Image: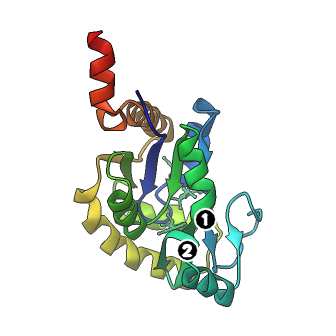
Amino acid sequence: MKYKGAILILSGPSGAGKSSLYKILAQEFPSHYFSISSTTRKKREGEIEGVHYYFIEKDVFENGIQKGEFLEWAQVHGNYYGTSKTQVLKALQEDKLVIFDIDVQGQANLKKIFPNQTTSVFITTPSKSILKERLSGRGSDSAEVIQKRLENALDEVESLHNFDFLIINENLEESAKQLVCIARSAFCRASLYQLQPFLQNWKK
Ligand code: ADP
Ligand code: 5GP
């Protein structure tokens, strides 16, 4: 007897390839729910409100914190980012695979809240210099923002040991295959099942 959906967290330095890998994964799991975060950072070119993020003002975000509207929130690269409770809890109750692209603080917090449901993957480049190339190649951030993200990456990789899986995203297709395997296994973790009722029923 399975009692709730599963959580899959994608974390890792900005520019490592989380969004690119998520896009491929999403095609394999049509019934998943992607948790759309709220953020106070500026919208990048091509980003869509309500698809990539809910872009909100700092005072609105802080008001949300006060009212307890976030399951988790953190300050990352100088901006607020947070996961709203309502939609995620609904998706879990509907037995869906709920996918998050959140930072290492968010991963630690969600793991505490949902220890049985959570599978987490750290995604990184083979090296810091490749990360720099990808951030520059993406063309979405200023030199100053890229510098800040690279500095933060040095701290983020120190949290690697808190994750269930590691993907070194050298080749996108290969990494996507690994991620699909991880997502499938996230959905059949023994800890997702109420084992006593299952066993009682099984023995009948
Ligand atoms: P993140 O979501 O982790 O910030 P993105 O998915 O936006 O990262 O990827 C950052 C940049 O690197 C993008 O321009 C993307 O096309 C590119 N990229 C992603 N994965 C690879 C890869 N395996 N090889 C080369 N470039 C990649
Ligand atoms: P970006 O600005 O590149 O979209 O995201 C910056 C960082 O914020 C990434 O590491 C991303 O995973 C993280 N992030 C995005 N949304 C959330 C969230 O809701 N909570 C937390 N803790 N981190 C988030």
How crowded pointer 2 is (Cα within 10 Å; few <14, some 14-19, many 20+) is rated as many
Q: Residue 186: give x, y in percent of width and height.
A: 39, 37
CB contact under 8 Å: marks 2 and 1:
yes
Q: Amino acid at mark 1?
A: Ser
Location of residue 158 by image quarter: bottom left
Between 58 and 121, the one lying in front of the other is 58
Disc 2 under 8 Å from ligand 2? The reply is yes
Q: Which mark is residue 37?
A: 1
Identified at 44% across, 34% down, the residue is 174
Between 181 and 93, the one lying in front of the other is 93
How crowded pointer 1 is (Cα within 10 Å; few <14, some 14-19, many 20+) is rated as many
Q: Residue 179: give x, y in percent of width and height.
A: 44, 38
Decide which of tag 2 and tag 1 comes sooner along the chain.
1
Q: Amino acid at mark 2?
A: Tyr
Question: Can you identify the residue that label 2 sits on?
Answer: 81
The answer to whether residue 75 is visible is yes
